[in-house]
Amino acid sequence: LQASMTVDKDFVISEVDKRIFGSFIEHLGRAVYGGIYEPGHPTADVNGFRGDALEAIRRLQVPIIRYPGGNFVSGYNWEDGVGPKAERKQKLELAWWTTETNQMGTNEFADWAKLAGSEVMMAVNLGTRGPDEARNLVEYCNHPSGSYYSDLRIAHGYKEPHRFKTWCLGNEMDGPWQIGAKTAVEYGRIANETAKVMKWVDPSIELVACGSSNRGMTTFADWEATVLDLTYDQVDYLSLHTYYNNNKDETDNFLAKSLDMDQFIDSVASICDYVQAKKRSKKKIYLSMDEWNVWKTIGTSRASERWQVAPPEFEDMYNMEDALMVGCLLISLLKHADRVKVGCLAQLINTIAPITTVTGGGLWLQTTYYPYLHASLYGRGTVLHPIIRSPKYDSKDFTDVPYLEAIAVYNEELSQVTVFAVNRHLTEELDLQVDLRSFGGVKVLEHLVLEHEDLKAVNTLEQPQQVQPHNQGNARTDGSRVEARLSKASWNVIRLE
Ligand code: AHR
């Protein structure tokens, strides 16, 4: 099988907003407690932050992390998580039916994120609360001093404001499972009024309005149009959430599902443009794909026994084909870098995550860690629109699925170009030719490959290196042409200079 790609410096899609490689940590399962925070763990620092987890996260260079939820935020009183830890209230947490100890809160998360090298994307509660608590939180986090909430932060030991820039106006407010779910009009109105006062406290912040919880919601599209109609002048981004899995064990169809993400992004962008046209506005709304991943345990019920503290939840084991899918989804985000400015792999640790810890023990990197790592490290710069020729296939839900899924990113500063490519073919190699005509002579820095004979192979604590990348890919160059034989069902990162 043969495929080709033509890439030219002039075929610019957009500069990548580095926040596209963001992630998400919710007070859910063992993401916080037993994940990033575990006082008493052999690698924990004085604040109780697990050193081994921090190291694995730092390696990913995660630019931004959404916090504290998720469904959790819709019942969260942020005041419960600040001030002396000994005085914090333990509360029933109704999103996941657990007990929240509040030992981690806004300030601790800001400290931890600094150590991780990440910005924080804060979410406010628009489920049980509204504009008042949200503007107080902005005052607490971002106002320098001289007001009740900013001085309270200082009294809590944080002289400098956190200056969080990106804020979510609630979470999945269209979902009946959400604490305080709303109709589009109810949500649009409260989001608009909340946005107004949050920006009056700090005009430098950027706001994300909730889009639909997923593309399958019956209110999808109408929800987006109504919410934007009511919030257009106050918000900067609209959120998209999407999860995929291969629970029916149809791998060819599963790997085609990144085409669904492509269509989802295109549809939401069209709705934003429709509202822009209707309003005759100069302002363009950008997209925040602030929850995306492979999620196999989706829809399974909450912890069987109620009110446990941080019970393990949704600890998916990712295999080789899941890593391919995550690779395809990262390529989809990059292809839409002109519109998608924030992306959050949901989530980062233990809960539907690329890193899994053992409470009191070690950790391992899941298969999906690697495409995420590669995209974050080598996907910064300008995304170039590749002209792709590839043989195609039809699957159960998709037609004309190209075997080759690929994108190129040019990092002008480093004079490097990286081609990310997935061969979706499950049994055959794909001979790829890349024409980099405007780049002159190029040479291969490295051709990283993630592949495994068994698409169901996983990493475990005992066998953490079952599925991991090697750099023995066979890409070679001749002037401005690159040739590479892509193994069946493989993720490839061809780094050139
Ligand atoms: O990421 C897990 C959950 O998925 C989030 O809490 C919610 O927003 C979504 O439904």
Image (cartoon, rainbow, N blue to C red):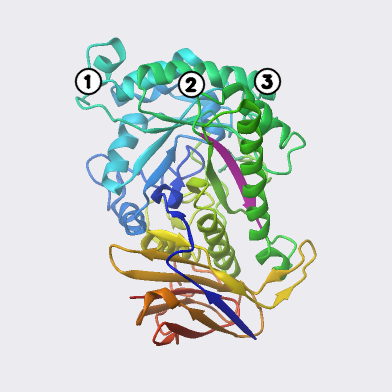
The x, y position of residue 386, in whole percent, is 53, 68
Of marks 2 and 3, which one's residue comes earlier in the chain? 3
Three-letter amino acid code of the residue under disc 2:
Ala
Of marks 1 and 3, which one's residue comes earlier in the chain? 1
Q: How would you rate the neighbour count of disc 3 (Cα within 10 Å): few for under 14, some for 14-19, many for 20 or more?
A: some
Circle 3 residue: 185
Mark 3 residue's CB less than 8 Å from ligand 1: no
Q: How would you rate the neighbour count of disc 1 (Cα within 10 Å): few for under 14, some for 14-19, many for 20 or more?
A: some
| Tag shown at residue 195 | 2
Name the secondary structure under disc 3.
helix
Of tags 2 and 1, which is closer to the observer?
2
Of the 4 image quadrants, the one containing the N terminus is: bottom right
Three-letter amino acid code of the residue under disc 1:
Ile
Q: Does the magenta stretch include residue 241?
A: yes
The x, y position of residue 288, in whole percent, is 52, 42
Q: Is residue 45 magenta?
A: no
Report the residue at 53% width, 64% height from top: 327
Residue 215: quarter of image: top right
Name the secondary structure under disc 1.
helix
| Tag shown at residue 439 | none
| Tag shown at residue 154 | 1
Residue range of the region highlighted in magenta in the rendering? 237-245
Q: Distance between the residues labelled 2 and 1?
A: 25 Å
Report the residue at 41% width, 47% height from top: 19
Q: What secondary structure characterizes most of the magenta part?
A: strand
Q: Is residue 346 visible?
A: no
